[in-house]
Image (cartoon, rainbow, N blue to C red):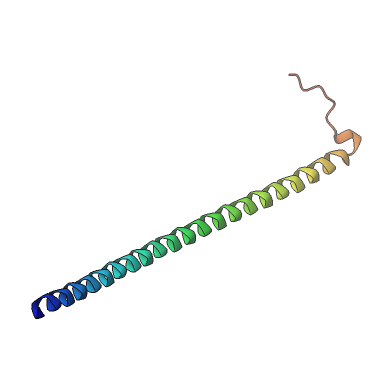
Amino acid sequence: MMGGIWAKAVGALLMIIGLMGAALLFVSGQRDRAKEAASRARAEAQSKSAVIDAERAIETARAQAREKSQGVQREAENRPADKRPDGDFRR
């Protein structure tokens, strides 16, 4: 009779150890997945930041080009009549 109780106790102890091991593996797996998700989020944030920076640079370049174009247009409009082209560009 004593052997049956001892076997059940050892079986229960092994079951508890097994469940704890499974829980530990599950938790470590969750930790790994959380690290991967954090890495993905960090990479995504960096790529979004790079896109925003590029868009800002493009918009700045467009604004500078517009200002330059408007300045050239103003200069052309303010030229004296004798400096203006006569419209006949044929050779």
Q: Residue furthest right?
A: 81
Q: Residue furthest bottom?
A: 2
The structure residue drawn at horizontal position 40% and vertical position 61%, both measured from the top left corner, is: 36
Residue 1 sits in quarter = bottom left
The structure residue drawn at horizontal position 63% and vertical position 53%, both measured from the top left corner, is: 57
The structure residue drawn at horizontal position 15% and vertical position 76%, both measured from the top left corner, is: 10
Asked whether 82 or 42 is in front, the reply is 42
**Vertical order, 91 against 61 (above or below):** above
Residue 72 horizontal side relative to residue 30, left or right: right
**Vertical order, 71 against 12 (above or below):** above
Asked whether 90 or 32 is in front, the reply is 32
Q: Where residue 5 appears, x then y in whole percent?
A: 14, 78
Residue 78 horizontal side relative to residue 50, left or right: right
The structure residue drawn at horizontal position 80% and vertical position 46%, both measured from the top left corner, is: 71
**Vertical order, 30 against 10 (above or below):** above
Q: Where residue 76 appears, x then y in whole percent?
A: 83, 39
Residue 70 sits in quarter = top right
Asked whether 27 or 45 is in front, the reply is 27
Q: Residue furthest front?
A: 1
Count how many numbered circles sit on residues in the image: 0
Residue 49 sits in quarter = bottom right
Asked whether 69 or 8 is in front, the reply is 8
Residue 48 horizontal side relative to residue 18, left or right: right
Where is the C terminus found, in terms of image quarters? top right
Q: Where residue 54 appears, x then y in whole percent?
A: 59, 52
Q: Where residue 68 appears, x then y in whole percent?
A: 75, 46
